[in-house]
Image: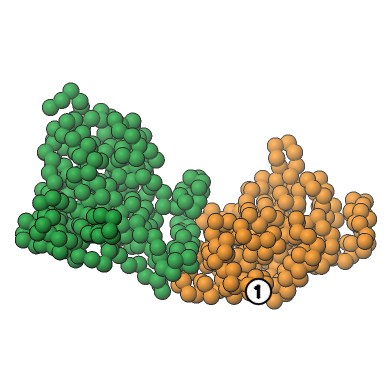
Amino acid sequence: MTPLLQVKSLTKMYGPRIGCKDVNFDLYPGEVMGIVGESGSGKSTLLNAMAGHHPPDRGEVVFDTRADGPRDTLQMSEPERRMLGRTDWAFVHQHARDGLRMSVSAGGNIGERLMAVGGRHYGDIRAQAADWLGRVEISDARIDDRPSAFSGGMQQRLQIARNLVTGPRLVFMDEPTGGLDVSVQARLLDLLRSLVREMGLSAIIVTHDLAVVRLLADRLMVMKDGHVVESGLTDQVLDDPQHAYTQLLVSSVLQV
Amino acid sequence: MSDYNFAYLDEQTKRMIRRAILKGLAVPGYQVPFASREMPMPYGWGTGGVQVSAATLTPEDTLKVIDQGADDTTNAVSIRKFFERTAGVATTEETTKASVIQTRHRIPEAELTEDQILVYQVPIPEPLRFLEPRETETRKMHSLEEYGLMHVKLYEDISQHGDIATSYAYPVKVEDRYVMDPSPIPKFDNPKLEMAAIQLFGAGREQRIYAVPPYTRVVSLDFEDYPFVASKADHACDLCGSEQSYLDEVILDDAGNRMFVCSDTDFCRSRRAQGHVGRLGENEGEAA
């Protein structure tokens, strides 16, 4: 089977300082990869470098495109990469307001990607927006409300709907549950888990919350100071951590 | 003649503006940056249009200036006087006799010909401005043809008002490539953007020039199930009786009486000269 995404010795430097260094991994269709580590360990840098938001200094990000098979996205022209960014790829930001248009209604937010790929039928766009609001458990009576009138959890769910409406195959998530209280977090995780399974999505989830990766991720990478220090199956890494830092991380989780 | 250089601007400046105009004509709908000059009038009073007109005028030209279709409003009168004084060109109020027409917010009702140039005053040339405030981003969107956001605006209109409520500065796509702001003309005028005359757009404060060459395809954006409609007030002109022209609503008193008149004063006058009379035409004809 061809990996959906192959990352090869990806390196991003901030001047003399390391953002992330020599990261290698393959992601297969339907697989969810978690990236954990403390603040400043380079996990968001890695995610942004893979998603093409910040060009990396070295390395390859090979994506299995629908049309031409595996291609290095860093060598693609910008229109191609941006096209990928609104069709097969999705990016869920930690703060919903980074990923939403706050002055545009919920329906417009969801419809934007459809219109960006050529949707020109108002009725169809609206029907799909309503359908997706339902799937992320937002009442479709709120389709014309602006996200600024939504709670934090609803905004995050709206952001997910807006990203998944074009049926992407790969979703990048940066701390999708950060800043939400635990009960809202639990429902969001539930939702994400069922969407990932239903749609057969592949996802890369960056988080510092080990419980989130335990629930969502099949595989786990642990980062420290820009390097990947350990990787493997999630349960294996969390139950039997090998690297000293991973052991510290796992034992630091508060027990209730 | 006066002590001014012909048409106020110096020759180097006019060359610079003409280069921008030619580039704009070569790439229809593309906003060409140019080094806009200080003009002896405030921004927002047509400094862009005046500079384009100045670079376009020759001593043989006949100039017409309209503001909201009218020849006799402050803006139109002062710009016409400006060129009478600095260029010494002939001026006219008759659309058919003009070779260069500078306009604010209207396209004349009379069909323009290949011998004419229409110069628009543009306040905000960037159609994506209110959707995406970053200029770097909007330029990228233009260069990559990412215009989904424009439809988000129309979507919002329909979801809030039940119909596309944008009634002026209605976005168009030029020659299947660039999305362009046609300046704040009513959407009634949008179908006329496909015309025989050269259309030049000048934005002084924003320092942009763009153009639509003759017979260029200009399509108003819309949805399949909410097609573009060129709307106007559902009345006939009260002076000349025309049912085809774009109308201004004039409040007559505080008892709710109102009249509708052609916004294109030359069109209305020439129709009345031909003997057409509207509802209030006979009593009010001379006063208007």
Depth check, front residue: B254 or A176: B254
Quadrant of the rendered image containing residue B32: top left
Classify residue B217 as left or right of residue A1: left
Where is residue B75 shown, x and y percent of the image?
25, 41
Residue B213 in percent (x, y) is at: 26, 52
Q: How many marks?
A: 1
Q: Identify the residue at image location x=75%, y=55%.
A: A179
Q: Secondary structure at mark 1?
A: helix
Farthest residue toward the front? B255
| Residue under the point 78% across and 56% down | A207
User: What amino acid is labelled 1 in the image?
Assistant: Arg
Q: Residue at x 81, y 67 (%)?
A: A215
Q: Chain of mark 1?
A: A
Whether residue A97 is visible to the viewer of this picture, yes or no, is yes
| B265 lies above or below B15 | below
Left or right: B253 in relation to A253: left
* Residue B141 % position (x, y): 48, 53
Q: Nearer the viewer, residue A209 or A55?
A: A209
Question: Can you identify the residue that label 1 sits on?
Answer: A135
The colour chain B appears in is green
Q: Position of residue A243 (x, y in %)?
A: 91, 53
Q: Colour of chain A?
A: orange
Q: Is residue A32 visible?
A: no
Q: Residue at x 66, y 57 (%)?
A: A96
In front: B126, or A238? B126
In the depicted structure, whether residue B250 falls above or below residue B104? below
